[in-house]
């Protein structure tokens, strides 16, 4: 009797034509993820008494900087791909956004803008923590349509078919998408317990995503760089986990005696 599950087929196309316009699914996935994240950020920050318009403005700055950072990080580690077509550096729709670069640039820009507005608060950090993995979970589907960021060959029934690979491979884009959605749920559940100091949820995100990415890097095959069997992003993921752990310990020690992270009680009490 045939299995209910079968391999995940390769996408028939990575774009759709609407009149003179060509819409790339990669860009649509990223844009959809960003819009959902901004929607959630507005709701969560407003629930703490924050200004949703400030959340919008901060998100715009962070997303723009994040895209630039993600592209620069990818290009800097893949210069050979652009040797014959240097102008292709601008062709973001072809793929090639390094998440860690986007996270760094986006986070620094958001912090800079909030401080400039005099609104750098623990409530904003908590509000934004689950928004990042939500955007990431949706955006990762763009990699499916571009047939990139997959893993090693597998005989599992949900193996992914890739045009340039002779056998199904691990759909690491799917693993990462589902893991990020799970991380959203974990962050929201931890927040409801009220046991974490306000502002510490972002460090839990770093620990969670760093762990997810480290494990996925063990089976991803999109980079030839290996040091002791681990990719460059694998080492970055470990660093992110360490930053998250250190930040969580430091923040909770700093916040000893402060009120726990209960959104219902955080209305206008900001640091």
Image (tube, grey):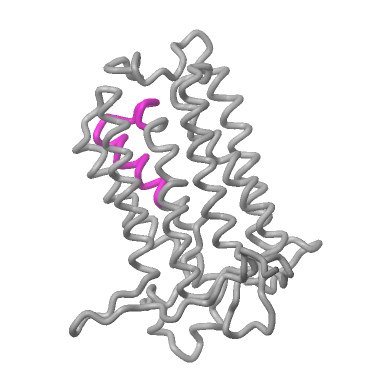
Write down the quadrant of residue 138 in the picture: bottom left
Does residue 149 lie above or below 49 as drawn? Answer: below
Does residue 265 lie above or below 151 as drawn? Answer: above
Residue drawn at (28%, 17%), measured in percent from left and top? 267
Please state the extent of the stretch shown in magenta in the rendering: 106-124
Which x, y percent locates residue 248? 57, 28
Q: Nearer the viewer, residue 247 or 198?
A: 198
* Count of numbered labels shown in the rendering: 0
Which x, y percent locates residue 56? 23, 43
Report the magenta stretch's main SS. helix
> In which quadrant of the rendered image does the N terminus lie?
bottom right
Residue lying furthest bottom: 84
Residue drawn at (29%, 51%), measured in percent from left and top? 35
In the shown orientation, is residue 135 left or right of residue 197? left
Which x, y percent locates residue 15? 35, 78
Residue drawn at (49%, 30%), measured in percent from left and top? 201
Which x, y percent locates residue 164? 60, 85
> In which quadrant of the rendered image does the C terminus lie?
top left
Residue lying furthest top: 257
Write down the quadrant of residue 262 in the picture: top left
Does residue 233 lie above or below 224 as drawn? Answer: above
């Amino acid at each position: 009797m045939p299995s209910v599950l079968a391999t995940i087929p390769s996408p028939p196309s990575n774009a759709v034509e609407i009149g003179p316009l060509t819409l790339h699914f990669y860009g649509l996935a990223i844009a959809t993820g960003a819009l959902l994240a901004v929607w959630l950020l507005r709701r969560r920050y407003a629930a703490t008494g924050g200004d949703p318009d400030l959340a919008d403005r901060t998100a715009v700055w962070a997303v723009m900087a994040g895209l630039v950072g993600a592209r620069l990080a990818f290009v800097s580690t893949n210069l050979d791909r652009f040797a014959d077509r240097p102008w292709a550096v601008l062709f973001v729709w072809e793929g090639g956004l390094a998440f860690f670069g986007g996270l760094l640039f986006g986070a620094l820009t958001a912090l800079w803008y909030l401080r400039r507005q005099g609104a750098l608060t623990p409530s904003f950090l908590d509000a934004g923590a689950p928004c990042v993995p939500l955007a990431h979970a949706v955006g990762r589907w763009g990699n499916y349509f571009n047939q990139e960021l997959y893993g090693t060959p597998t005989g599992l029934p949900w193996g992914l078919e890739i045009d340039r690979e002779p056998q199904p491979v691990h759909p690491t884009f799917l693993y990462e998408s589902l893991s990020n959605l799970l991380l959203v749920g974990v962050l929201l559940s931890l927040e409801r317990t009220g046991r974490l100091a306000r502002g510490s949820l972002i460090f839990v995100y770093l620990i969670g995503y760093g762990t997810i990415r480290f494990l996925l890097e063990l089976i991803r095959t999109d980079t030839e760089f290996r040091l002791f069997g681990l990719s460059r992003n694998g080492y970055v993921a470990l660093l992110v986990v360490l930053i998250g752990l250190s930040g969580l310990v430091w923040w909770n020690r700093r916040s000893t005696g402060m009120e726990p992270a209960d959104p219902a009680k955080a209305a206008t009490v900001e640091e």
